[in-house]
Image (cartoon, rainbow, N blue to C red):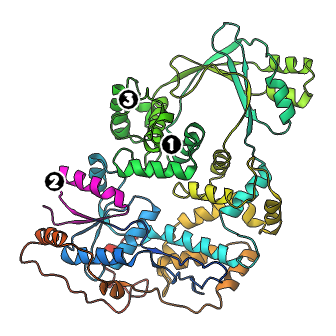
């Protein structure tokens, strides 16, 4: 039995991680944070929200999500102070890890950071090989982003509309690009009698709904192949998986995220919240074996497309898969997992396809009285068909039709083109936006949407502006650690705010200038006074990990967290590395 406490995020991971650690000879005691330890207080309906960020950009308003969880973590660590903070290997996990380190600093001053990416043995071993100190610098992007988003929202809270860095950018994006959920798929016969030629497009200018219906009703001319080409696909990132799950399984982006998280916690899926479109060489070789058992050949070289910028692999299944099953007849978790496996199988093979010239279709449509611009547009579409092995999940024999896509899938697809948001927030942002009543089911602006558009700050309507703020939050400048009396995220947020357009900067500064500087609350003493959460059995298990002669740590708590940054020579070991 190892003398370790592992602190993880999700309760659902606890059992699976315990089992994996036992297999690895590390029978540790596992406790969870249940996500973030702190949140900003929820605003009561009809009441003005209380200040939560002061004039120095300190987010002093954070409060415990569940005081009992904070208490339990401290209880456990007092009995067994050899701590592994195994939160997820992402920015949210880094924020949680730093919060945990601060929570237990008086009883376990040197916790280790285990950047967890999966519950299976290989993932845990990989995380252990990357073990290091809990870094304050790693928490900067997540804390900074939260401060900036709160500041933007609160600065415009008295305008009668909701303003946000992502939500307002989505509104501007819809207004400028006018995405639609109505699409047209066309099928033209081939001269060789094999599968038809397929082309598809959104029904928007120069194609109208009436023109689309007219074209779909025509028997299109026979087309000849003009060239045969090879193509490959990359593994899908989380956003693309969400889109496919929406249109194949009828799941909202948030439902897909939930299903992926459940599979991840059960050790059946790699880390889900990834924007990568490639997997590591080791994962690619493993996928080759998994797909071989499912009857599909896979070339690891085609899957190994991970770039240096990618922190995570593209989501991929762990364990056996059956590609012949119907994902629509499975649970959400297993259906999404199968779609992901199909995507990996597709990416592991080279595919042949053929192209045909669309000029014949253009001339045909003109002869049928279709307007010139519409006919030219249809003729310019990609007319293709697949050859060889069928791409998993793709139909070859399709008819001409007008069809409707899900609004959440189209909105997310458009947002991804503008790099809006993060994998961890894609689903929630899309779902929240669609609930505001700013667009109809076809993503056209409603009267309410038009009103909000006219009253929103012009700069924030630009999705590229939002993406630039996102990039600024991710950038960790070493100078922010030198600002005395301020945390690095305070300094980072101030730097970003003062670099925004003057109108937005002035609005934000004006909103917080009257809020006096306040210290960040220290909840350790408060939670130490709560009733014990440990059972006698748990107390015994923890005692075994420290031995019969172990001295129980005291609950003496420092009166307050030291100011940031620390004076030279007073920085604990786990904070030295920026």
Identify the residue at horizontal 44%, vertical 59% (top origin): 90
Asked whether the beta carbons under mark 3 and mark 2 sit within 8 Å of each other, the answer is no
* The C terminus - image quarter: bottom left
Identify the residue at horizontal 32%, vertical 85% (top origin): 570
Q: Does 362 appear above or below 146?
A: above
Residue 67, position as x, y percentages in the image: 38, 78
Q: Nearer the viewer, residue 137 or 107?
A: 107
Q: Does 114 appear above or below 216?
A: below
The residues tagged by marks 1 and 3 sit, at their Cα atoms, a distance apart of 18 Å
Identify the residue at horizontal 80%, vertical 62% (top origin): 448
Which residue is identified by label 1? Answer: 277
Which residue is identified by label 3? Answer: 291
Between disc 2 and disc 1, the foreground one is: 2
The residues tagged by marks 3 and 2 sit, at their Cα atoms, a distance apart of 30 Å
Which residue is identified by label 2? Answer: 25
Q: Dot 2, crowdedness within 10 Å: few (<14), some or many (≥20)?
A: few
């Amino acid at each position: 039995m190892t003398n370790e406490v592992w602190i993880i995020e999700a309760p659902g991971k606890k059992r699976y991680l315990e089992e994996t650690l036992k297999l690895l000879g590390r029978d540790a005691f596992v406790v969870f944070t249940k996500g973030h330890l702190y949140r900003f207080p929820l605003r009561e309906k009809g009441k003005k929200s209380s200040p939560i960020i002061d004039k120095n950009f300190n987010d002093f308003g954070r409060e415990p999500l569940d005081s009992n969880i904070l208490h339990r973590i401290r209880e456990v660590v007092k009995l067994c102070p050899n701590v592994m903070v195994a939160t997820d290997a992402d920015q949210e996990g880094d924020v949680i890890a730093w919060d945990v380190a601060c929570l237990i600093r008086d009883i376990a001053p040197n916790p280790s950071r285990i950047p967890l990416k999966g519950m299976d043995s290989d993932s845990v071993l990989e995380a252990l090989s990357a073990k290091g100190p809990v870094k304050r610098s790693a928490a900067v992007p997540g804390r900074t982003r939260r401060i900036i988003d709160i500041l933007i929202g609160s600065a415009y809270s008295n305008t009668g509309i909701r303003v946000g860095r992502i939500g307002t950018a989505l509104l501007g994006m819809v207004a400028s690009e006018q995405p639609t959920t109505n699409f047209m798929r066309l099928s033209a016969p081939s001269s060789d009698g094999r599968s038809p030629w397929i082309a598809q497009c959104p029904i928007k200018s120069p194609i109208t709904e009436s023109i689309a219906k007219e074209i779909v009703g025509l028997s299109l001319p026979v087309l000849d192949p003009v060239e045969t080409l090879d193509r490959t696909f990359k593994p899908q990132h989380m956003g693309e998986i969400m889109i496919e799950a929406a249109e194949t399984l009828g799941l909202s982006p948030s439902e897909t995220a939930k299903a992926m998280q459940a599979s991840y916690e059960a050790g059946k899926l790699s880390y889900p919240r990834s924007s990568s479109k490639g997997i590591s060489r080791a994962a690619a070789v493993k996928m080759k074996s998994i797909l071989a058992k499912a009857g599909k050949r896979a070339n690891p070289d085609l899957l190994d497309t991970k770039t240096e910028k990618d922190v995570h692999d593209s989501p991929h299944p762990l364990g056996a898969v059956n590609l012949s099953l119907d994902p629509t007849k499975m649970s959400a978790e297993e259906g999404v997992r199968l779609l992901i496996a199909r995507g990996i199988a597709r990416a592991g093979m080279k595919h042949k396809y053929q192209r045909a010239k669309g000029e014949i279709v253009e001339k045909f449509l003109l002869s049928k009285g279709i307007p010139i611009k519409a006919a030219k547009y249809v003729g310019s579409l990609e007319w293709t068909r697949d050859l060889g092995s069928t791409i998993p999940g793709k139909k070859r024999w399709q008819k001409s039709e007008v069809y409707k896509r899900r609004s959440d899938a189209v909105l997310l697809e458009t947002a991804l083109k503008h790099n809006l948001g993060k994998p961890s927030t894609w689903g929630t942002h899309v779902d929240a936006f669609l609930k505001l009543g700013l667009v109809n089911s076809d993503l056209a602006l409603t009267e309410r949407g038009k009103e909000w558009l006219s009253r929103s700050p012009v700069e924030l309507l630009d999705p590229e502006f939002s993406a630039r703020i996102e990039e600024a939050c991710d950038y960790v400048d070493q100078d922010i650690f030198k600002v005395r009396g301020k945390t690095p995220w305070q300094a980072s947020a101030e730097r970003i705010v003062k670099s925004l357009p003057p109108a937005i900067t002035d609005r934000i500064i004006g909103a917080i200038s009257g809020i006096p500087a306040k210290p960040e609350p220290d909840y350790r003493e408060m939670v130490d006074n709560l009733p014990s959460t440990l059972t006698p059995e748990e107390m015994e298990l923890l005692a075994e990990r420290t031995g019969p002669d172990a001295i129980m740590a005291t609950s003496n708590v420092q009166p307050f967290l030291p100011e940031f940054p620390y004076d030279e020579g007073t920085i604990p070991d786990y904070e030295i590395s920026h």
